[in-house]
């Protein structure tokens, strides 16, 4: 892979850089982590040139560090994103993304008849993987949906 030679967005001192997000997914990631509600400084790059992806989105959040669990929620939208932890301008850690086995309280169920819509309950899906195919099974209606259906109906 050809290295991207220059910083497209200013370096940060402490915090998290989520890089290599596919173009158009950056805004969803902001919502996923409620980053749009934070008081910390956030810099966002959308449609930045990337040798690996063609175009990518990038998010830098100062003074916020994602847990491994939070980073794994990202895997559903952007399995190839990199999550870098920055301390004193240095990359001190890169989190590896892996799909969680269960996803709670993030996505609503695409089935409009699902009981979860009428109740004050948290949604929940079991993550099923068949080769590179990712599917989610609702714990309430037990219907199985492709990853795309679930992320699109929640965008
Ligand atoms: N970064 C930053 N502020 C810093 C250090 C790094 O915003 N003080 C950003 C870089 O711009 C990059 C990401 O954090 O988007 C990862 O940095 P680095 O590991 O140095 O970049 P790469 O070698 O390109 O790593 P990778 O291929 O994993 O993206
Ligand atoms: Zn359901």
Image: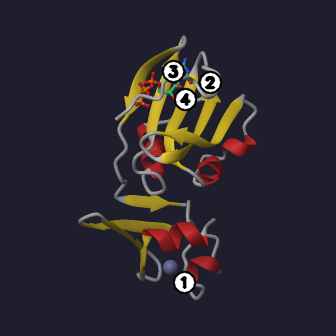
Residue 138 sits in quarter: bottom left
> Tag 1's secondary structure?
loop
Viewer-side label of 4, 1: 4
The response on whether ligand 1 sits within 8 Å of label 4 is no
Q: Are marks 3 and 4 in contact (CB under 8 Å)?
A: yes
The residue indicated by pointer 3 is 86
The residue indicated by pointer 2 is 63
123 to the left or right of 93: right
In percent of width and height, residue 34 lies at 66, 47
Distance between mark 2 and mark 4 Cα atoms:
7 Å
The response on whether ligand 2 sits within 8 Å of label 1 is yes
The residue indicated by pointer 1 is 111
Q: Earlier in the sequence, mark 2 or mark 1?
A: 2
Q: Are marks 4 and 1 in contact (CB under 8 Å)?
A: no
Task: Give the residue at x 65% y 51%.
Answer: 27
Quarter of the figure with the N terminus: top left
């Amino acid at each position: 892979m050809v290295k991207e030679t220059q910083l497209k967005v200013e370096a940060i001192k402490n915090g998290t850089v989520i890089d290599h997000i596919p173009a158009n997914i950056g805004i969803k990631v902001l919502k996923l982590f409620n980053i749009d509600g934070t008081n910390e400084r956030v810099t966002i790059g959308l449609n930045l040139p990337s040798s690996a992806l063609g175009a990518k989105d990038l998010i830098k959040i100062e003074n916020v560090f994602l847990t491994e669990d939070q980073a794994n929620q990202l895997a559903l939208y952007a399995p190839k994103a990199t999550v870098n932890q920055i301390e004193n301008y240095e990359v001190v850690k890169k989190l590896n993304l892996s799909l969680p086995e269960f996803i709670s309280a993030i996505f609503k169920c695409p089935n409009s008849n699902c009981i979860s819509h009428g109740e004050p309950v948290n949604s929940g899906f079991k993550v099923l993987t068949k080769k590179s195919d990712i599917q989610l099974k609702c714990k309430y209606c037990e219907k199985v949906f492709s990853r795309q259906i679930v992320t699109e109906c929640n965008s």
